[in-house]
Amino acid sequence: MQKTLQTFKAREYHSIHLMVQRFIEPTPTRESCWRAIVMMGQNSATYKFALAASLIELSSTRSDLILLEDLAAPFSRHLREHVKHLGKQSTRKTVPPLIEACNQSNNGELTEQSLIETTTKLGFVNVIDAFHVVSQGDTPVRFFNDDRKTRGGITLTDDFFYLAEGGQFSNLPQEVEARWNLVETAWGLDMARNLLDVEYDLEGGQLYVPRRDTSRVDVTSCRDALNGYQKGKCFYCFIDISIQSGNDDLAHVDHFLPHVLKEGREIRNLDGVWNLVLACQTCNRNKLARAPQVRYLTRLNTRNNYLISSHHPLRETLIRQTGDTDPDRHSFLNRSYQVAVDTLIHTWGPTEEFGAAF
């Protein structure tokens, strides 16, 4: 029994590793490497998110050298805010000293300067070494070099500055925040993984976790949570999309299999994350209540497997909604798609597609 479990875990780990490599692409881009770091790490603490948010905040700096004390200011502020929102920031049973310092700061027992000094001493012991590690090794693109011993900080690379100048950079802060919210919610609710479910509020556009007492915990915007897994592209035509309110290219949350099918009750959980994609305004407007052409089913499965390759709690939600194994998930999507086509008759596809993103 023990050997069977070990074999299953080994296969699962290998499958996740392959999906991470596929996400990063044969020719890695800066954006895909950054998103793999944020969204596909096996997190035991949230320090990687705090570091990512701090790097984004410091992107306008004129110097490539970021001293630890200068990095500690935004790092501790981001961490302190999340501790205030939901105290649990790691999988440890005991509260880490830095998190306790954040609690003291939030309670007025520790000054901001003292928190920065504590963060400088304790906050970067592991996260700087671990930041670029995803799955079985470092990402091909590095965004900083560790120069703590020689220069007292980290040195931002050209790739980081090119990332900051790219068209996708404006979406990255919200993606970091969404991933952070998902992870800390999973830890903070203290629920077994197989009981944790993320649902979608169609009216409010929020992902939330229902509690046993019929209340709910709002987690994050659906757009913010899904955008990175689509690499900032429309699911159908691959044009760039935005998740910033008021932007002309603001993405729409689209039901891959149309919401109108909910009336028939033959396809379960049409509002589930498995069936939600982000679409540009043109595709969303033209698709109407039609099922996408069958070739998009493979793309949906790929996107869902990216989500499954992440951890806490979208992985568990997707598995529960679509199946434990890849063949199970293929079968679920095929059955659901056939019901949709039999009901709606007509299918749809965009008139033009840009370069494939996934």
Image: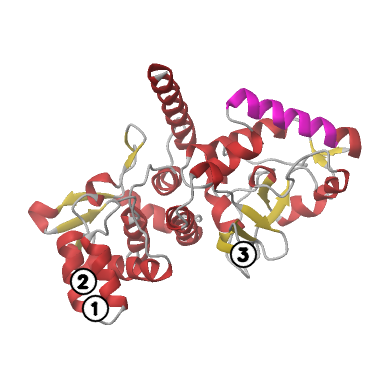
The kind of secondary structure element at disc 2 is: helix
Task: Give the quarter of the figure containing the N terminus.
Answer: top left
Answer with the quarter of the image where residue 281 lies: bottom right
Q: Position of residue 163 (x, y in %)?
A: 40, 53
As drawn, the label of residue 116 is 2
Q: Amino acid at mark 2?
A: Ile
Is residue 349 rendered to the left or right of residue 326?
A: right
Q: Residues within 10 Å of mark 2 (few under 14, many from 20)?
A: many
Quarter of the image holding residue 17? top left
Contact (CB < 8 A) between labels 3 and 2?
no
Q: Is residue 167 magenta?
A: no
* 92 or 12: nearer the viewer: 92
Which residues are the magenta region? 325-340
Is the C-beta separation of discs 1 and 2 under 8 Å? yes
The reply to whether the magenta stretch includes residue 328 is yes
Type of amino acid under label 3:
Ser
Q: Main secondary structure of the magenta part?
A: helix
Q: Which residue is mark 3?
A: 215
Amino acid on which the number 1 mark rests in the picture: Glu
Residue carrying label 1: 112
Q: CA distance from mark 1 to mark 3?
A: 35 Å
